[in-house]
């Protein structure tokens, strides 16, 4: 079973320059995470873009959608910035014949205290087990994009409150 991993940027791939107090989205870190974990499955990593998700627009989401739709792999993980991950996940719901799991991190993968490795692992496990659909793997849970929010105060994803 092959898994295709599409990277789009976001905090997971950020590189910080302390002396300048600035950051840039760097090269995809997911390849290093998987190599260090010595995974035993076939995968391919493709970078669609290297953007902070706050800078993404509908044209970027359309590019992500079209790229995944055209690809023949039916098990897909997307690394993405957490601020607009839900919007992209909702856009990807137009694809109904693939398992698509979006993940990211609150801290850059390069940081020792990052949640990136855990979230990538959850996404990889989920994409192998779930039926076709679009999901978000964050904070040790799998979410439906229609029923989740990012809690910016607590820096975590959680179920939408019942109304």
Image (cartoon, rainbow, N blue to C red):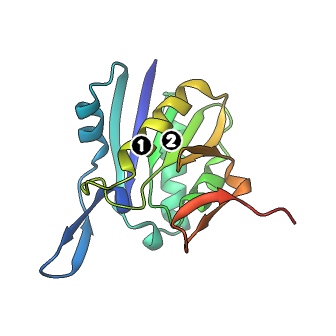
Q: Residues within 10 Å of mark 1 (few under 14, many from 20)?
A: some
Pointer 2 and pointer 1: residues touching (CB < 8 Å)?
no
Report which residue position mark 2 lands on.
68
The C terminus sits in image quarter = bottom right
Image position of 41 (left or right of 153): left
List x then y, in percent, for residue 158: 64, 58
Q: Give the camera-side residue of 43 and 155.
A: 155
**Residue furthest to the left:** 19
Position of residue 65 relative to residue 34, above or below, is below
**Residue furthest to the bottom:** 20
Is disc 2 placed on a helix, strand or loop? helix
**Which numbered mark, 2 or 1, is in the foreground of this view?**
1
Image position of 135 (left or right of 28): right
List x then y, in percent, for residue 121: 43, 36
Report which residue position mark 1 lands on.
118
Position of residue 92 relative to residue 132, above or below, is below
Give the residue at x 53% y 25%: 128
Task: Say which mark, if any, is on residue 30.
Answer: none
List x then y, in percent, for residue 25: 28, 64
**Residue furthest to the right:** 163
Quadrant in the rendering for residue 51: bottom left
Give the residue at x 54% y 69%: 154
The disc, 2 or 1, on the residue closer to the chain's N-terminal end is 2
Position of residue 82 relative to residue 46, above or below, is below
Image position of 133 (left or right of 107): right
Position of residue 128 relative to residue 11, above or below, is above
Give the residue at x 67% y 28%: 131
């Amino acid at each position: 079973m092959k898994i295709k991993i599409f990277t789009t940027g976001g905090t997971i791939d950020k590189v910080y320059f302390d002396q300048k107090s600035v950051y840039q989205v760097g090269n995809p870190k997911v390849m290093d995470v998987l190599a260090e974990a010595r995974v035993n499955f076939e995968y391919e990593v493709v970078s669609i873009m290297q953007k902070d998700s706050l800078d993404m627009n509908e044209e970027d989401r359309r590019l992500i959608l079209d790229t995944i739709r055209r690809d023949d792999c039916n098990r897909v993980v997307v690394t993405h910035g957490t601020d607009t991950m839900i919007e992209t996940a909702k856009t990807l719901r137009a694809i109904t014949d693939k398992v698509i799991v979006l993940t990211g991190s609150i801290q850059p993968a390069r940081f020792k205290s990052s949640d990136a490795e855990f979230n990538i692992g959850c996404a990889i496990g989920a994409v192998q087990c779930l039926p076709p659909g679009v999901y978000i793997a964050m904070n040790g849970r799998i979410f439906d994009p229609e029923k989740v929010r990012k809690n910016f105060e607590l820096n975590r994803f959680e179920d939408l409150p019942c109304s």
